[in-house]
Image (cartoon, grey):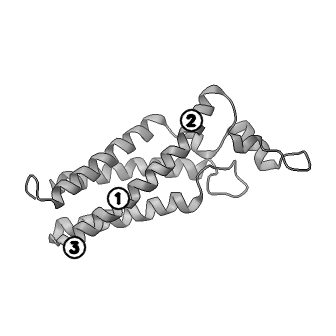
């Protein structure tokens, strides 16, 4: 089951790379870009903790150290919480994109009565995460949940290792 968890984690990471690449390419990481409802530390923290957990899981599969395996699982739990946070922030953006409206952040006017260039661009194109492929978001989430369960079952000794 540890190998199944590893494969699921790697495939999940592939979907995560697609989403991260889309977010960066559409200006999510740039201050002068179209904006994002995702703070950069949330995105990059999710990525770095997931990558660290994956490396630890590879070490666990190779060596079999329970301490390393449980540490990987703990990191995976944190990664999942960050992922749910991003999902909760993405859903309104996705819905706004389907209806053609802009996000609340894009319609905020300055006290002087005008919008910044970034806000004007965001009103036209939407935040970077509006460009996420929906099927990738769904697959990434389902695979992440599967990975979490497989890692937990492996560490609990269910199904052998």
Q: Give the image location of residue 71, x and y in percent.
A: 28, 69
Q: Is residue 107 above or below residue 58?
A: above
Q: Is residue 24 above or below residue 130?
A: below
Counting every numbered tag in the picture gives: 3
- Residue at the (51%, 44%) spot, across then down: 88
Q: What whole-number distance in Å separates the C-alpha atoms at marks 3 and 1? A: 15 Å
Residue position for label 1: 77
Q: Give the image location of residue 66, x and y in percent.
A: 17, 70
How many C-alpha atoms fall within 10 Å of the one at disc 2: few (<14), some, or many (≥20)?
some
- Residue at the (59%, 57%) spot, across then down: 39
How many C-alpha atoms fall within 10 Å of the one at disc 1: few (<14), some, or many (≥20)?
some
- Residue at the (27%, 46%) spot, across then down: 146
Q: In front of the other: label 2 or label 1?
A: 1
Q: Give the image location of residue 8, x and y in percent.
A: 27, 49
Q: What whole-number distance in Å separates the C-alpha atoms at marks 2 and 1? A: 25 Å
Label 1, secondary structure: give it.
helix
Q: Does label 3 or label 2 sit earlier along the sequence?
A: 3
Label 3, secondary structure: give it.
helix
Residue position for label 3: 67
Q: Are marks 3 and 2 in contact (CB under 8 Å)?
A: no
Residue position for label 2: 94
For the residue pair 57 and 71, the one nearer the viewer reads as 71
Q: What whole-number distance in Å separates the C-alpha atoms at marks 3 and 2? A: 40 Å
Label 2, secondary structure: give it.
helix
Q: Give the image location of residue 127, x and y in percent.
A: 64, 44
Q: Are marks 2 and 1 in contact (CB under 8 Å)?
A: no
Q: Quadrant of residue 60?
A: bottom left
For the residue pair 71 and 5, the one nearer the viewer reads as 71
Q: Does label 2 or label 1 sit earlier along the sequence?
A: 1
Q: Are marks 3 and 1 in contact (CB under 8 Å)?
A: no
Location of the C terminus by quadrant is: bottom left
Side of 96 relative to 2 (left or right): right
């Amino acid at each position: 089951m540890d190998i199944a968890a590893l494969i699921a984690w790697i495939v999940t990471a592939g979907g995560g790379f697609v989403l991260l690449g889309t977010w960066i390419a559409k200006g999510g990481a740039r201050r002068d870009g179209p904006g994002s409802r995702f703070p950069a530390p949330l995105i990059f923290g999710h990525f770095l903790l997931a990558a660290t957990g994956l490396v630890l899981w590879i070490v666990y599969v190779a060596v079999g150290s329970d301490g390393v395996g449980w540490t990987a699982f703990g990191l995976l739990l944190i990664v999942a919480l960050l992922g749910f946070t991003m999902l909760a922030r993405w859903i309104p953006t996705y819905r706004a994109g389907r209806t053609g409206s802009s996000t609340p952040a894009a319609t905020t006017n300055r006290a002087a009565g005008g919008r910044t260039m970034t806000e004007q661009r965001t009103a036209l194109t939407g935040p970077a995460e509006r460009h996420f492929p929906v099927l990738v978001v769904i697959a990434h989430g389902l695979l992440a949940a599967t990975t979490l369960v497989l890692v937990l079952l492996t560490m609990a000794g269910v199904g052998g290792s």
